[in-house]
Image (cartoon, coloured by chain):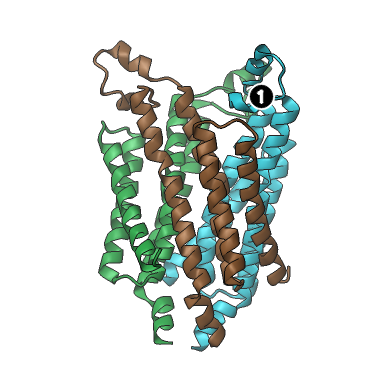
Chain colours: A cyan, B brown, C green
């Protein structure tokens, strides 16, 4: 049973829980950021959201696409496409019982790359900063996936 | 080992499994609902989906954007952006061994808020009903994330 | 404790880890495929991505929507909408301790249906091939959700 206790109580599980929560919270914060840009740019997707307008013409004018809102939404979508695979593969990776230092390296590189990716997308920073941040995050997830597949004897 | 048995066999895990499955099934049902609106509105995104049309002109006319279809798709996207964080953070929260009653409160408030959110989005109900449903769901997830981070001694 | 050991060390968990990782890697590969189509079609969403253009007019011309890029992105979105529910419900299903052969059947049918779905979407193959692949995948996930809900005594 020593192995089992090791898996559940291990520091790797605690580290994964912490970093997974941080990066999911970061992803969730894109929603209020979208709402902020929608209200400040007065740009909405649903007629019932234009209650701040006084005339029907103003309401219609608020049903539009704004470049700043779309930028935040693309960043949010990129988070969904990259952070969810990290969570799934990171959890399975954690169950393979990696070294704490190796696991921390993967988690920190991924979370750091996604924080930088968001900054690079929203400001925006000149390319290839955003592209590199995306690749580093993908690399960390692929590296964990390799260990999962080689441990489970595909 | 008592603690371990507690974690795996606990009623909190069973409760999480039940509510997570319900809310994921709700999210999945947005796909058939999108298909339903696409067929009844005759509005498709791919040329190969317009087989019901008889002439090439009819086919092209079906490649359009319909406001009802887009509304269902925005609701589905909002589900992805909110329900997936709930699943990830809810699972980690479950592993921190919370009281059953506190955990049930979080799970029920979240699932209830998302069911109401869907109704408010599709009908639609006047604002701020949809906005409040969204905030209540975010609040439940943030509350669980706080416990995860304070338990893992960030 | 025999049951616990069974759950963690079981071949069902190993099988789930393998198939979940494969299907998540497949989903992740849609990102480089989108990038590939964006570069070969010279079609971007952000002004800072158009660095290969020489004149400001060329840059603006690259900020457009391309049907091939949109097709890959719709396929990616469909993956998010279907593969994530499979991962969540498949993990909970794995914890209910199903027979290995039944579990393998579910995992293989789902992963096979999604691989075929991607081929059918990108080529594209004539309908209803893509529609059937989508339905088969949904069916596998619903079947696992049924077992989760009946095991947890909803």
- Measured as percent of width and height from the top left, residue B26 is found at 44, 47
Q: Residue at x 38, y 70 (%)?
A: C96
Name the foreground residue: C102 vs C73: C102
Q: Is residue B82 left or right of residue B53?
A: right
Question: Image quadrant for the C terminus of chain C?
Answer: bottom left
Query: In the image, is residue C82 above or below residue B88?
Result: above
Q: Residue at x 51, y 84 (%)?
A: A3
Question: Image quadrant for the N terminus of chain C?
Answer: bottom left
Q: Is residue B103 visible?
A: yes
Name the foreground residue: A34 vs A125: A34
* Image quarter of residue B141: bottom right
Report the number of numbered marks: 1
Q: Residue at x 50, y 72 (%)?
A: B11
- Measured as percent of width and height from the top left, residue C122 is found at 36, 35
* Image quarter of residue C81: top left
Query: In the image, is residue B51 above or below residue B118?
Result: above
**Mark 1 neighbour class, 10 Å CA radius: few under 14, some 14 to 19, many 20 or more:** many
Q: Is residue B142 left or right of residue C100?
A: right
Q: Numbered disc 1: what chain?
A: A
- Measured as percent of width and height from the top left, residue B113 is found at 57, 48
Name the foreground residue: C104 vs A133: C104
Per the image, the residue denoted by label 1 is A50
* Image quarter of residue A90: bottom right
Q: Residue at x 62, y 21 (%)?
A: A63
Q: Is residue A6 left or right of residue C122?
A: right
- Measured as percent of width and height from the top left, residue B111 is found at 53, 52
The secondary element bearing badge 1 is classed as: loop
Query: In the image, is residue A18 above or below residue B141?
Result: below
Q: Is residue C25 visible?
A: no
């Amino acid at each position: 049973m020593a192995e089992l206790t090791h898996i559940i109580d291990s520091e790797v599980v605690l580290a994964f829980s912490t970093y997974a929560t941080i990066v999911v919270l970061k992803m969730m914060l894109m929603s209020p950021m979208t709402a902020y840009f929608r209200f400040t740019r007065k740009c909405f997707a649903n007629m019932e959201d234009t209650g701040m307008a006084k005339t029907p013409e103003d309401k219609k004018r608020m049903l539009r696409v704004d470049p700043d809102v779309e930028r935040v939404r693309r960043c949010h979508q990129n988070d969904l496409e990259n952070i969810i695979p990290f969570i799934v593969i990171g959890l399975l990776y954690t169950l393979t019982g990696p070294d704490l230092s190796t696991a921390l390296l993967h988690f920190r590189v991924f979370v750091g790359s996604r924080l930088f990716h968001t900054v690079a997308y929203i400001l925006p920073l000149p390319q290839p900063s955003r592209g590199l941040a995306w690749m580093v995050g993908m690399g960390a997830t692929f590296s964990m996936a390799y260990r999962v597949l080689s441990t489970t004897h595909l």
